[in-house]
Image (cartoon, rainbow, N blue to C red):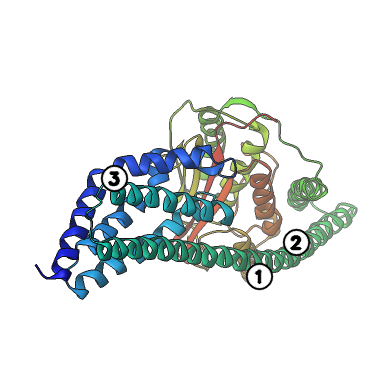
């Protein structure tokens, strides 16, 4: 028999031996890893997670031992390399450090070396050339596997570090943008305060005119009431914003029925919706008991609902709530309107939409003034039950939406926005249904 053919036969026998000993080799490797005091992460993994891509790499090694053509050997080598890269990715995702990855490969190499030594020792008639070829293939397997795994691990580690740098840069940019938006919101609030104070001053002057007729007096009184109510609501918002900025607001977590809260809130708003010939629909279980800060959840829902009614001229508003199907221990509230939208295709985070909301509020107010509408028609009150909402009502909406966003952050809730110009806006808030006690 040709010497090369004899080597191929003996290497194929070795491949079959490795196949029958596969479970024993992997078990021995797992024991060594568990007994290594410097390998702590494997103890947290299941057997399947620990073995990971190694069985597939051993398959490739066996194919290399059986290969009779260079093409077969190269294909097996390529598969071995791909699985080694996948192994490095998994170990990075599983929380291994570099030392653990290296020690794990050293342990596997030792187990394979022990297996090959036992195989050669049990066959004294084994061709030395076949034994040498086997050792060479085993060494290539260990070195290539370790190198590719570590290389992939290091690439991912570097990418993660670069990602952290980018995240920090983005966070700084977002912080600067938020500060600018906050300054704009305060400027808008100051503008609204000045405007409402001007109304109050003018009405006060008119009331002092003794020549005023009774119908005119009633008109001025309505304007005064509207201006004072607007000031009251705006000052409440400013106070809340200031408390949030100063960190004086804390969450008080206790069980409450979110379904009942939202049902009652929408019932109180039906008069405001009917007054503007809008529908107000609700969809959700009547009872949804969760944990959270009931007062702040109510404030979030109320702000979003009033905002939706204020800017919706045709159609109406739909309020929905349910347990989150895609995330455990969370519940979702949506406020959807058929209003003009925010003029942007933004889909969260909300911070990018605050500037657009304020800009659109300014545009609506400007249109109202050009149309010559009397400010006496804009009625505002701090409660849902008595508030008559006008689509062209002056607003410090940057403040209102900013408060919603900050309250969501305080409650560990996520706030998403979907909007389309001319078709409406949907705010989606995802709240925790339970909180971890400190």
Label 2: how many residues lie within 10 Å, few (<14), some (14-19) or many (20+)? some
Marks 2 and 1, the one that precedes in the sequence:
2
Element on which disc 1 rests: helix
Residue at the limit of the structure toward the left, as seen here: 1
Residue identified by numbered label 3: 22
Q: CA distance from mark 3 to mark 1?
A: 78 Å
> Is any atom of residue 312 visible in this view?
no
What is the number of the mark on residue 389? Answer: none
Q: CA distance from mark 2 to mark 1?
A: 22 Å
Residue identified by numbered label 1: 366
Front residue of this view, candidates 228 and 104: 104
Element on which disc 3 rests: helix
Tell me if residue 98 comes above or below residue 258 in the rendering. below
Element on which disc 2 rests: helix
Residue 339 x %, y %: 49, 58
Residue at the limit of the structure toward the bottom, as seen here: 70
Residue 216 x %, y %: 76, 53
Q: CA distance from mark 2 to mark 3?
A: 64 Å
**In this rendering, position of residue 357 left or right of residue 322:** right
Residue identified by numbered label 2: 182
Front residue of this view, candidates 398 and 374: 398
Front residue of this view, candidates 64 and 186: 64
Marks 3 and 1, the one that precedes in the sequence:
3
Tell me if residue 320 comes above or below residue 395 in the rendering. above
Label 1: how many residues lie within 10 Å, few (<14), some (14-19) or many (20+)? few
Nearer the observer: mark 2 or 3; the answer is: 3
């Amino acid at each position: 028999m040709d010497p090369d053919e004899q080597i191929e036969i003996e290497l194929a026998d070795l491949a079959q031996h490795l196949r029958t000993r596969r479970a024993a080799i992997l078990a021995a490797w797992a024991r060594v890893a568990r007994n290594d005091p410097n390998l702590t992460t494997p103890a947290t993994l299941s057997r399947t997670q620990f073995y990971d891509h190694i069985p597939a790499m051993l398959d490739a090694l066996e194919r290399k031992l059986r290969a009779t053509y260079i093409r077969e050997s190269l294909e097996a080598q390529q598969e071995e390399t791909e699985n080694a890269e996948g192994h490095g990715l998994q170990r990075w995702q599983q929380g291994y450090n570099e030392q653990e990855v290296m020690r794990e490969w050293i342990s596997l190499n030792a187990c394979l070396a022990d297996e090959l030594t036992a195989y050669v020792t049990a066959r004294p008639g084994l061709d030395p050339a076949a034994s040498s070829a086997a050792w060479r293939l085993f060494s290539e397997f260990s070195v290539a596997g370790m190198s590719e795994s570590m290389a992939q691990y290091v690439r991912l580690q570097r990418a993660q570090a670069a990602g952290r740098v980018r995240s920090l840069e983005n966070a700084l940019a977002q912080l600067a943008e938020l500060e600018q938006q906050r300054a704009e919101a305060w400027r808008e609030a100051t503008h609204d305060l000045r405007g409402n104070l001007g109304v109050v001053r003018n009405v006060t002057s008119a009331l002092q005119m003794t020549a005023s007729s009774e119908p005119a007096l009633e008109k001025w009184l309505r304007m005064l009431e509207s201006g004072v109510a607007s000031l009251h609501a705006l000052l409440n918002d400013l106070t809340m914003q200031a408390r949030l900025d100063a960190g004086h607001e804390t969450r008080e977590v206790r069980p409450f029925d979110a379904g009942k809260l939202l049902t009652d809130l929408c019932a109180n708003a039906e008069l405001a919706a009917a007054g503007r010939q809008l529908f107000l629909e609700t969809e959700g279980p009547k009872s949804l008991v969760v944990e959270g800060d009931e007062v702040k959840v109510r404030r979030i829902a109320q702000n979003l609902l009033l905002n939706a009614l204020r800017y919706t001229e045709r159609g109406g508003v739909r309020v929905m709530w349910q347990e989150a199907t895609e995330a455990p221990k969370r519940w979702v509230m949506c406020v959807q309107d058929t209003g003009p939208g925010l003029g942007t295709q933004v889909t969260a985070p909300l911070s990018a939409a605050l500037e657009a909301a304020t800009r659109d509020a300014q545009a609506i107010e400007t249109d109202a003034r050009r149309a010559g509408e009397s400010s006496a028609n804009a009625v505002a009150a701090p409660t849902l039950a008595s508030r008559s909402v006008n689509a062209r009502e002056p607003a410090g909406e940057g403040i209102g939406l900013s408060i919603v966003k900050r309250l969501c952050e305080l409650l560990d809730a996520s706030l998403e926005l979907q909007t389309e110009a001319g078709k409406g806006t949907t705010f989606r808030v995802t709240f925790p249904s339970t909180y971890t006690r400190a």
